[in-house]
Image (cartoon, grey):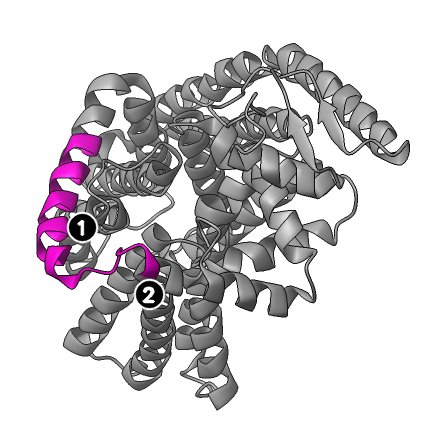
Amino acid sequence: MQKSNQHSVGSFLLRTAIGVAVAVELFALGVLAYLGSFTRYRADDYCEISILGKGPALLAIYRNYMSGEYRAANRFSNLLFVDWSEALGKYNVQFLPTIMILVWIVGLIWLIYQVFKLIGIHISLLTAILLSTSIVFFSAIQAPNRFQTFFWRSSVATHFAPLVFMPLMMGFILFQVRSAKSRPPALWVSLIVCAVSFLLGGFSEPATAFMFVVYVFSLLYVWWNGGSEQQTALRLLASGLFGTFLALCVLFFAPGNLLHGKTSLSILPGAVMESFWFAFKFVRGTLLTLPLPTLISVLIPGLLFFCLYINPDNRPFHPEQKRRIKTLLILVPLLHFLLIAASFAPSAYGQAYPAERARFLGRFLMTALLIFEGALLGMWFAQFKGFAPRRDLVFPIAGFTLLILGFYPLRAGFTILNQVDGYKSWASAWDARDAYIKKSVAEGVRELVVVQLDSIGDVLEYKADPISWVNVCAAEYYGLNSLVAP
């Protein structure tokens, strides 16, 4: 009777802990999205809108790519994303952070669910939701530059957007592979995978290099292990690899790169070696400077899966599952390190440590690694025979500990909330300046002096020099001959 009561308490605590953790993480992410409602056009945003205003979107993108005048002209998918964003209306940059965070969470839920199905471990939808929100939350609060990553649309289009859409793409591939038992996918599925991979690769070089390595390792894994769905998996992964490779070539051999001498193949080997050093510095820096969120990132999924598999209702793993968990515990960190290095390779090619916004993909990979390793460790510890006679006692204790840890994101949410007043004041000042510029233009003014606002997130502001590229793009956006802010 006592064991039954302890089991009931453990089950209640586990469900409550999961619900609390999800709710608190969504609260923190909701505050982050709300903060994004105070963002406005900045720097490159003016340039991109001006480029798209020079004709039909696809033609304007093609001309921009071929001319190579704009400093990111080779990233062809960026302007497509900006064009789609502008279709949302006047307040599109304010809505965008919320939309992107929601899509990212949904995509990760689907991908996580498909991954666990593939490795033969069943998880509930609520567990997949917690893992997804945890990855998004811990990635967000540790982002090297949160403003540029989530709120500055030009940077969102370059570094965040591909990260949002990639889980949807990979989840789609895994779903098609799992469905191949009943029906092989049609040809159009391979074409979609190829086309979407090409478009995702057109956002930025770090995302493209990352995707390329993911496809290569996935192909090698499927080819080595075989299986009933091998042919389907090989075909879809090869389609994705071809689309990504094509995007990589389009980015690398862009006229702008050729014009400025940025296509030297001779420095590629050195850049590859440098990217491993950059990845090591990044991982070491994370462990040394962010110890608490790193520890919590492991503990939450670790306790969650420990509770799930210490639960007396669940059967122990069979020997094959245990071997698979031990193998993943070793291989997953190695794979993630290689993927972080791949995402840093374009920066290493440019002979520089990745900029803050370019490190966010590495931040996401590090977070996903910690959470996945925590889940594997939780399952592994739950199989210890020493817990067998004490399962009814250990289960509620672990559930209570998980419940306490679930409140950790609350502090981060309130910290972000404290920034609202500052963002709101800046947005009001920007709106007042924007209204003044538009009023002046309507009155026939073509050369204008405006107030300079504080820079947020290290994004460039108007300068005193009228030929500064930010001033030139902003002047073109508003229809002015010159715009200065002394």
Element type where label 2 sits in the image: helix
Quadrant in the picture for the N terminus: top left
Amino acid carrying label 2: it is: Leu
Quadrant in the picture for the C terminus: top right
Q: CA distance from mark 2 to mark 1?
A: 18 Å
The spot of residue 231 in percent (x, y) is: 30, 86
Q: Residues within 10 Å of mark 2 (few under 14, many from 20)?
A: many
Amino acid carrying label 1: it is: Leu
Foreground residue, 262 or 143? 262
Left or right, residue 458 beside residue 100: left
Q: Is residue 269 magenta?
A: yes
Left or right, residue 358 beside residue 54: left
Left or right, residue 399 beside residue 103: left
Q: Nearer the viewer, mark 2 or mark 1?
A: 2
Report the disc number at residue 248. Answer: 2
Q: Which residues are magenta?
A: 259-283
Element type where label 1 sits in the image: helix
Residue 388 seen in render: yes
At a point 9% along the width and 51% down the height, the residue shown is 270
